[in-house]
Amino acid sequence: MASEKPIVAVTCTAPVNIAVIKYWGKRDEELILPINSSLSVTLHQDQLKTTTTAAISKDFAEDRIWLNGQEEDVGQPRLQACLREIRRLARKRRSSGDEDPLPLSVSYKVHVASVNNFPTAAGLASSAAGYACLAYALARVYGVESDLSEVARRGSGSACRSLHGGFVEWQMGERADGKDSVARQVAPELHWPELRVLILVVSAEKKLMGSTVGMQTSVETSPLLRFRAKAVVPARMAEMTRCIKERDFQGFGQLTMKDSNQFHATCLDTFPPISYLSDTSRRIIHLVHCFNAHHGQTKVAYTFDAGPNAVIFTLDNTVAEFVAAVRHSFPPKSNGDKFLKGLPVRPAPLSDELKAALGMDPTPGGVKYIIATQVGPGPQILDDPHAHLLGPDGLPKPAV
Ligand code: DP6
């Protein structure tokens, strides 16, 4: 019987997502309710993922958490909000008399261990994958089957979008209690198989101003942000959904770039202003527009979050040429062989016409490396007990 086992552990993985219609600004800081809806693409976990083990036992004296091998303060408010929320849902389920697959007490303490296979806080949305994975793993270990948007959202707003694969919208909702502020899949993972994603890592440094504080200041001071949320985003959500459903890359790419630019404009409209883009980011923007102008159509699109790294969308038949253009404009300094990670990209020649059209002097080392990936699935459960990050004693296994 499960209840005789000293410890019950579940291990899950969850993906990173990248918004093409940006979330920036909360109407409720406590419940993490946004001022506008947003829409994202879930990236493939073969390249970027968080893995989390959650274990419960009657022998655990307190909740504990380890991130990338380091024990962290379990008392931080957002983590506490997730734990409270999952236990509330577990109690609700039990009191509603649903069958209980894991007859373990909701009051058992939990140990959590989580690792990323990419640098934390490098602007690669690690908190989204992290909190989605936490919500998913906690739900499995406490036997919760309801919508997890609220649990993930309480950790980090954008995390609720990492609960699904493919293309995902986070509907802002209207209710004060946030019950209708939920993430929903717009189109599944395999809907647009030609779509490719290139992450141009410009800097792996921790960012200067986190999203939470940044967007708070924007809500307080930027009239442009208020205008965006009310007058711009609703129509953009509908248009982006159409582009995705019809696999209209021209429309998708242009709107993605415009929305990224408008988000960064609201950052500049914030007082004091916030700037997440670096000189290299701006060079990448220029490169993309020159590349598209040369081809006479939108073949690649960029988007930037709260950091200088670029995320590029393109179709499979353009990847090789665009990577060659990036290599030409940002020649790798030392790690030529490790410049490209993830999906294989064949080397492609760059025509003299395109070289001339890129119209800028190369910046050696500007782009540190590229991760080539694609659209991917939502959170997964790992059945193999070897995958557990916690040992039978409930403590992190030594790193291998
Ligand atoms: C620019 O979800 O990290 O990446 O809710 O305060 O944790 P909190 O913020 P977070 O903000 C993400 C902002 C963004 C845009 C987006 O992902 O939609």
Image: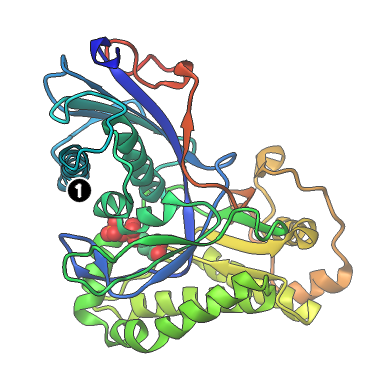
Residue drawn at x 24%, y 66% is: 33
Q: Nearer the viewer, residue 338 or 213?
A: 213
How many marks can you see? 1
Residue drawn at x 66%, y 39% is: 338
Amino acid type shown at disc 1? Arg
Res 318 → quadrant: bottom right
User: Where 5 falls versus 352 (above or below)?
Assistant: above
User: Where 1 falls versus 213 (above or below)?
Assistant: above
User: Where 169 falls versus 78 (above or below)?
Assistant: below
Residue 120 location in percent, x, y?
Answer: 40, 43
Q: Which residue is mark 1?
A: 78
Q: Is residue 209 visible?
A: no
Residue 196 location in percent, x, y?
Answer: 67, 57
Residue 115 location in percent, x, y?
Answer: 40, 32
Colour scheme of this structure image? Answer: rainbow
Res 350 → quadrant: bottom right
Left or right relative to 44: residue 95: left
User: Where 173 falls versus 57 (above or below)?
Assistant: below
Image quadrant of ligand 1 equals bottom left
Left or right relative to 50: residue 2: left
Residue 400 location in percent, x, y?
Answer: 47, 15
Check disc 1 and report its element: helix, strand or loop: helix
Q: Nearer the viewer, residue 69 or 1?
A: 1
Residue drawn at x 34%, y 81% is: 229
Asked if ligand 1 lies within 8 A of label 1, the reply is: yes
Q: Nearer the viewer, residue 371 or 141?
A: 141
Res 70 → quadrant: top left
Left or right relative to 26: residue 398: right
Q: Is residue 206 visible?
A: yes
Residue drawn at x 36%, y 40% is: 136
